[in-house]
Amino acid sequence: MSSGIDPQTGLHPRFATNYRKGWTLVLGVVAAATALCVGLVSSSPAGAPPRAARAMQANPLNLGSFRFQERSGQTVTQAELADRVWITGFIFTRCPTSCPRISSTMKGLQGKLQETGVQLVSISVDPAHDTPDVLARYANGLGADPNSWWFLTGDHDSTFSLIRNGFLIPVEDASAEQVAQGLEEVAHSSKFALVDRGNRVVGFYGSEDPEEIQALLLAARRLDNVWSFRLPAINATLNGTCAVLLLLGWVLIRSGRWKAHVVTMITAIILSAIFLACYLTYHFVVVKGSVPFQGVGRPLRILYFSILLSHTILAIVLVPLIVITVIRAWFRQFDRHAWVAQITFPVWLYVSITGVVVYWMLYRIDFSTIAMAAAA
């Protein structure tokens, strides 16, 4: 890249000009994205996990010790589940109303989580009737996989104690008068509990709410696949490093150190390619979709989605810009390379920085805690 360099300034003439075209493009996209978000964004998140589930991530419930018998006759204690991520629901086989729905939803979870190590657990709240044989017939009728979906029964008092004192949810035997009035024989919660490794309850999700079930699936996959869910942090690191390299490359070319500039920019391109591979893996293989933003309040959500939308649009625009910039440098078309670089540089820098901002807003900042503190 020595051809065309001014020996007095160390700059190619084109690099001595400003980057007005690139920044104009960036600001134009940001303005358009903000205007669109002002018109479309609501004040509350759609499809987000319940507040209780979010709050419990930082303050999980420790279940302590327990002992059950599985439908197969196997004894299941806290030790058998301590190294697993598991989802549990509370049912009994004589239940006429809520339990068929709970078990049907659990069957749906079985199909969607079959490629994971997440364990499904149905705990009977009617252990006097629900013996292992009874539960085995019930499970067979549901098509429950004996390896990934367990049905547990145990001592009545110990079961109720675990539910009340471990999961902190109500359960109560109905009186004869209540049963005569048509109530279920055991009053119990219809929520699913998500339990992390170490038998720590980290959230509750309504079995009748499709949005909460989707949130449960996402949270369970995240806990089960620890390494893959580190990809957002890796992506943010790649974006941040790219931003530093871009600024360094800009300083190097302006000081006439074009060889160091070439090395720096090639490194930035490689990191961007790695980022793209990690990003696609995370969204299309791991979570299989997008991750909902948890922030509440219209101004905050407009800010987030404006940044996200402009970041996404400019990231798409950036790919051909980088290709054109590199091709022109490769063929030593330095005048044309410098012209397009004045557009590529601001766009690339904005995309890299906002990639880090989006990561922090989506994964690192606990907006629910901030909102509760502000309300207090």
Image (cartoon, grey):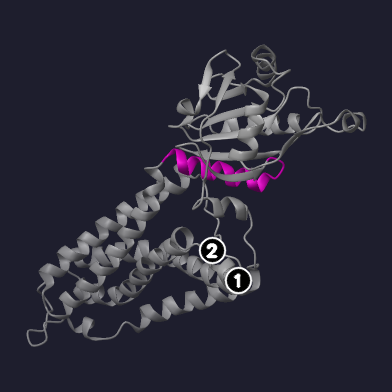
Give the prevailing secondary structure in the magenta stretch.
helix
Residue 205 horizontal side relative to residue 348, left or right? right
Q: Residues within 10 Å of mark 2 (few under 14, many from 20)?
A: few
Tell me the SS state at disc 2.
Answer: helix
> Residue 273's image quarter?
bottom left
| Label 1 sits on residue | 376
Give coordinates of residue 84: x percent, y percent. Answer: 46, 32
Q: Which residues are magenta?
A: 207-225
Q: Which three-letter amino acid code belongs to the residue tagged 2?
A: Thr
Farthest-out residue, left: 7
Q: Residue at x 24, y 76 (%)?
A: 338
Residue 276 horizontal side relative to residue 191, left or right? left
Tell me the SS state at disc 1.
Answer: loop
Which quadrant: the C terminus?
Answer: bottom right
Q: Residue at x 13, y 79 (%)?
A: 4
| Label 2 sits on residue | 369
Question: Compared to 185, does 276 lie above or below?
Answer: below
Give coordinates of residue 205: x percent, y percent. Answer: 63, 44
